[in-house]
Image (cartoon, helix red, strand yellow):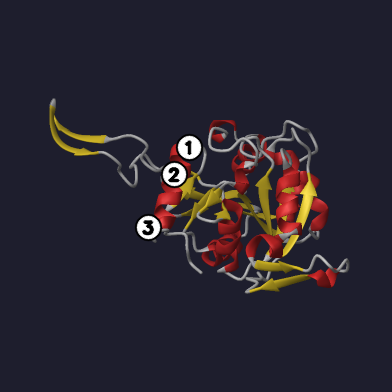
Amino acid sequence: MKVFILCGGRGTRIQAVNETVPKPMLPIGSRPIIWHIMKAYQAHDLNDFVLLLGYKGHVIREYFLNFAAYTSDVTVDLSCTTPERLTFHNNPAEPWRVTLVDTGDSAMTGARIWRARHFLGADDTFCVTYGDGIADIDIGQLIRFHHAHGKLATLTGVHPPGRFGELTLAGRQVRAFNEKPDISNSGYISGGFFVFSAKIFERYFDDREDLVLEREPLERLARDGELHMYRHDGFWQAMDTPREFHLLNTLWQEGNAPWKMW
């Protein structure tokens, strides 16, 4: 099963962290967040990735084309001009097949998925996620849920992380103050981590540059009764702002990263 990862957005709210790389390449620890996302899928035996590139896509392309050089110690024999001049040490190879697809600098999410559809068969089921969000989702269970309900599309519903302090009140008296609540009780939002049948391309997608996955395609699928929600009540966190970037890095550095399932 292939995993499409949306990697083409500009990420304007987080550019203060680093303006030279696209958001999927921002590091958590020593590796970009896209590596963490791919490792989470690998933990459930999904290793065939299609990266939907756009803004500064060449940075992502160079990373994977030179993956061994970026992730291992290397000796370069400058007296040699053949490929044998490179010796890689402790090479942490990954069992991944990575397809890099240029889907345009300005295309929206729905158009990017449409433009990579030729990497699928007509009857394929495939996963889609964003290149800037991480979770401890049981991907295998998500896929089984999708097959069980028999519809065209599944999204993962998550609880939005609390961004502000929450107050417990009795009248106007503050009974409790929780500065950084883990989970809000406001219900579910879409956390990405989709599973789709390739049949969605017959009715719900096209090549319009402004086609946004989260609007017309998902809204029409919902109206047609073809969209189900998989509930995820565990950890989920998008990385849209510098604060969220620092939060994920703190969790990783402290050894408290819930998404680390490998």
Q: Which residue is mark 3?
A: 254
Q: Quote the CA–CA distance across marks 2 and 3.
A: 12 Å
Of the numbered discs in the image, which one, if any, rests on residue 246? 2
Residue sitting at the far front? 79
The amino acid marked with disc number 2 is: His
The amino acid marked with disc number 1 is: Pro
Q: Are marks 1 and 2 in contact (CB under 8 Å)?
A: yes
Q: Position of residue 37 (x, y in %)?
A: 57, 56
Q: Is residue 42 left or right of residue 165?
A: right
Question: Along the polypeptide, which appears first: circle 3 or circle 1?
Answer: 1
The amino acid marked with disc number 3 is: Glu
Q: Is residue 75 above or below residue 103?
A: below
Q: Residue at x 45, y 55 (%)?
A: 232
- Between 14 and 102, the residue placed more toward the observer is 14
- Between 210 and 51, the residue placed more toward the observer is 51
- The kind of secondary structure element at disc 1 is helix
Q: Residue at x 28, y 35 (%)?
A: 165
Of the numbered discs in the image, which one, if any, rests on residue 103? none
- The kind of secondary structure element at disc 3 is loop
Residue 237 visible in the shown view: yes
Q: Is residue 58 left or right of residue 180?
A: right
Q: Residues within 10 Å of mark 3 (few under 14, many from 20)?
A: few
Of the numbered discs in the image, which one, if any, rests on residue 242? 1
